[in-house]
Image (spheres, grey):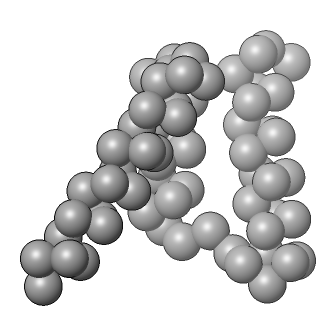
């Protein structure tokens, strides 16, 4: 099994655990994790992406 296969398997397992916990990943979240894998994002890049996304969403809500 390659590193990519290992990452995909862990992502599937994490998504399954989220479902068991009653907090399933939506299609947008799954696409984001697939993008991280496809683009080879480092952990730091992933965190920066998520933090930026949260900030944009918060700013959008305050403008409404």
Quarter of the picture containing the C terminus is bottom left
Relative depth, front residue between 49 and 25 = 49
Query: Residue lying furthest left in this view?
Result: 63
Relative depth, front residue between 7 and 61 = 61
The quarter of the picture where residue 61 lies is bottom left
Instruction: Kindly identify the residue that appears in the image at 55 percent across and 56 percent down.
Output: 30
The quarter of the picture where residue 23 lies is bottom right
Instruction: Kindly identify the residue that appears in the image at 79 percent across and 14 percent down.
Output: 2
Instruction: Kindly identify the residue that appears in the image at 88 percent across and 77 percent down.
Output: 20
Residue 38 in sight in this render: no
User: How many numbered marks does the figure carry?
Assistant: 0
Relative depth, front residue between 22 and 49 = 49
Q: Position of residue 55 (x, y in %)?
A: 32, 54
Compared across the picture, whether 44 is left or right of 52 comes to right
Q: Judge whether 46 appears above or below 13 on screen.
A: above
Compared across the picture, whether 8 is left or right of 33 comes to right
Compared across the picture, whether 35 is left or right of 52 comes to right
Residue 63 in sight in this render: yes
Q: Position of residue 7 (x, y in %)?
A: 74, 30
Q: Judge whether 40 appears above or below 56 on screen.
A: above
Q: Where is residue 41 in the image (x, y as percent from the top left)?
A: 50, 22
Quarter of the picture containing the N terminus is top right
């Amino acid at each position: 099994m390659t590193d990519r296969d290992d990452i995909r398997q862990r992502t599937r397992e994490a998504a399954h655990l989220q479902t068991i916990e009653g907090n399933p990943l939506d299609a947008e979240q799954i696409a984001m994790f697939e993008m991280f894998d496809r683009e080879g994002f480092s952990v730091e890049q992933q965190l920066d992406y998520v933090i930026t996304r949260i900030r944009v969403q918060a700013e959008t809500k305050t403008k409404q």
